[in-house]
């Protein structure tokens, strides 16, 4: 299995802050890395695919970068609706794996 | 537009077999590259991928659960069925099905169902 490790597991931030979440793969996955946002009681929503491509309809304050084993999700200016849990997922292998999630909370 | 919806029992007893159905619209599982996957999430915990089936009937399973899982498709009914044997209270989770495609750059789950909560308890 390809293991995905996210950091931090949680963070507190204020509206307007710049927030960065990191995801590391246990082996190189090129840019086959997706990011999801999940709010309580809801299904995950695709934000970023192929490491840096913004899914249609997702605000431009979300961005992704990285390749190989190290990836980053950045929210440039945190909005109230961005408080949620974020997951990375590798699609390099057809044996999908997810990170353990990063919960973004209000400071 | 693409939609998916999971259905099945909300409560199963330990050792029983769980059968979940994903009914979808807006795409066909006979289209090259298309697939449907299952992912679960125990209460308060992370997402865990379970199984995946593609248009050509290629199947993939989580190595840790492979012996307990079977995924099948009925293309004519736009349905995918997941069975999980020997259920345990640790299998209590919300179970999601999701669309994927190998011909897009996502290659992971892009459209998700709403999820269905399955509780395992005697």
Image (spheres, helix red, strand yellow):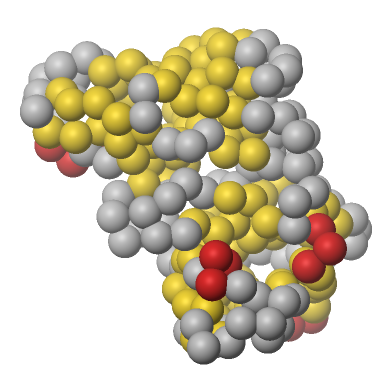
Q: In the image, what residue occupies the spot 22% across and 14% down?
A: A18
Q: Is residue A40 visible?
A: yes
* Quadrant location, the C terminus of chain A: top left
Q: Residue A105's x, y, as percent?
A: 19, 34
Q: Is residue A50 above or below residue B83?
A: above
Asked whether A55 or B107 is in front, the reply is B107
Asked whether A67 or B85 is in front, the reply is B85
Q: Is residue B81 visible?
A: no
Left or right relative to B4: residue B15: right
Residue B102: quarter of image: top right
Left or right relative to A14: residue B91: right
Q: How many marks?
A: 0
Asked whether B112 or B9 is in front, the reply is B9
Q: In the image, what residue occupies the spot 79% across and 54% down?
A: B61
Q: Residue B101's x, y, as percent?
A: 71, 46
* Quadrant location, the N terminus of chain A: top right
Q: Residue A55's x, y, as percent?
A: 46, 35
Left or right relative to A81: residue A33: right
Q: Residue B48's x, y, as percent?
A: 58, 50
Q: In the image, what residue occupies the spot 40% across and 60% down?
A: B43
Q: Is residue A107 above or below residue B102?
A: above
Q: Is residue B77 above or below residue B84?
A: below
Q: In the image, what residue occupies the spot 42% across and 21% down?
A: A7
Residue B50: quarter of image: bottom right
């Amino acid at each position: 299995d390809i293991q995905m490790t996210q950091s931090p597991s949680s963070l507190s931030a204020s509206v307007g802050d710049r927030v960065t979440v990191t995801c590391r793969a246990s082996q190189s996955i090129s840019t086959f890395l997706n990011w999801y946002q999940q709010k309580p009681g809801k299904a995950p929503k695709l934000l970023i695919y192929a490491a840096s491509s913004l899914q249609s309809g997702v605000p431009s304050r979300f961005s992704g970068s990285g390749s190989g084993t190290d990836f980053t999700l950045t929210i440039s200016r945190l909005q109230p609706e961005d408080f949620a849990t974020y997951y990375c997922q590798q699609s390099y292998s057809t044996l999908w794996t997810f990170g353990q999630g990063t919960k973004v909370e209000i400071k | 537009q693409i939609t998916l919806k999971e259905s099945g029992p909300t409560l199963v007893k330990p050792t029983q077999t769980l059968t979940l159905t994903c009914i979808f619209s807006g795409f066909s599982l006979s289209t090259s590259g298309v697939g449907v996957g299952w992912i679960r999430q125990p209460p308060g915990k992370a997402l865990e991928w379970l199984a995946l089936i593609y248009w050509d009937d290629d199947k993939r399973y989580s190595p840790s659960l492979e012996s307990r899982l079977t995924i099948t498709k009925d293309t004519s009914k736009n349905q995918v069925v997941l069975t999980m044997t020997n259920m345990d209270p640790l299998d209590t989770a919300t179970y999601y099905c999701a669309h994927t495609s190998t011909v897009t750059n996502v290659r992971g789950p892009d459209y998700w169902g709403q999820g269905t909560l399955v509780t395992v308890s005697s």
